[in-house]
Amino acid sequence: VRNEDLLTKLKELGFENMTYNYILDSETAALIADEYGFEATTNDNTSVDLFEQPECTEQKLLVPRAPVVTIMGHVDHGKTTILDYLRKSSIVNGEFGGITQHIGAFSVKTPKTKKMITFLDTPGHAAFLKMRQRGADVTDIVVLVVAADDSVMPQTKEAIKHAKNSGVPIIVAINKCDKPDANPDKVVADLAGHDIDVEDYGGETQVVRVSGKTGLGMEDLEESIITLSEVLDLKAQESKTLCEGWVIESEMKKGLGNTATFLVRRGVLERGKIIVAGNTWCKVKIMKDEHGKVLKKAGPSTPVEVIGWKDLPEAGQLGLEAKDEALAKKVILNRMAREEKFKEAQDIEKINEMRQSEL
Ligand code: GTP
Ligand code: MG
């Protein structure tokens, strides 16, 4: 049946605003088939979807992974300066010649212990909250930046609240310790007064005195993160599993198309693999790290820029591997159909409410 004819038929049958790409549910489709003299059998696969795999309990399949760190703190206390310093030091210490580009997250190898740390490159509370709202437990550790010349401020308190609500442990970085009017001891006292069990007073929360400007204490900060991550015993399943990860951010880039920073949390991402995130998917065409280096594989806690998305996925979305393109497409069609249905149901509810209020 030609598309136009079908649309005309649908109109006759009382369907309004039909377009050629409208998704019919199986019941309606069967009714229409009946109009054309066919008896439809329904193969109900509308429930086809991808889901997170259950947590891996087999100890021997779990491997240590790098901690994922978010930097939070009050305006102007030095979040960006600290991130910039860490990013640059990774170039100086590492084998990378070039400058880093912004891809939403970057990895650093600590100078002393040679361990990896992944920093999310979007400081601030909005990004953290947006992720959390989507149920994305991306962050393992919050580094709370407090300026030594300004101490605890409204957004410091807010950051403490967010970290506590989400159960993410804090490391305090008292920044700007190079300044003559720095008073780190006051910061420690103030934090203790805001329910942070600082180690200076026998508590568990590490406090590091740093300067993002001079680099003072920055290695200590990195080692503190490693120490905490060892206590947290962060592990992930790398082999014998499909790949899973978070979309950290996405951007349409000239010449590259739709790109997204993807943070692998399970399995290994490789070229050619298919990832579904929300209502879009990608067949990984190219994968790059923050230095623009093309990667063949990316394991847990590795952030990569992924090129090959059909549309821009949203930050905070969970990406799940599909075994082939056909499955990816089917999953997305189903997800969109379900959303459509949900919207319809909401509209009906709204109309009913309006009627009720008119009565
Ligand atoms: P927002 O993104 O606006 O919230 O600020 P931020 O927390 O990212 O602060 P940013 O890194 O932009 O630093 C604010 C100002 O403090 C800048 O002028 C920095 O140069 C300065 N600054 C940051 N860290 C230090 C430090 O360790 N020592 C000194 N002396 N100045 C610093
Ligand atoms: Mg900033």
Image (spheres, grey):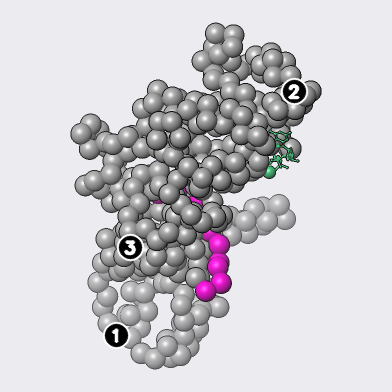
Span of residues in magenta:
243-255
Which amino acid type corresponds to the residue marked 1 in the rendered image? Gly
Provide the secondary structure element on which disc 3 rests: loop
Labelled disc at residue 37: 1
Tell whether 59 sits left or right of 209: left
> What residue is at 45 percent from the left and 35 percent from the top?
110
Whether 205 is drawn above or below 281: the answer is above
Front one among 35 and 148: 148
Q: Where residue 172 sits: x, y (%)?
A: 59, 25
Q: How many marks?
A: 3
Residue 252 belongs to the span the image colors magenta: yes
Which amino acid type corresponds to the residue marked 2 in the rendered image? Ala
Labelled disc at residue 182: 2
Q: Which residue is mark 3?
A: 271
Which amino acid type corresponds to the residue marked 3 in the rendered image? Arg
Instruction: Find the distance from the CA under tag 1 to the CA under tag 3.
Output: 47 Å
Instruction: Find the distance from the CA under tag 2 to the CA under tag 3.
Output: 49 Å
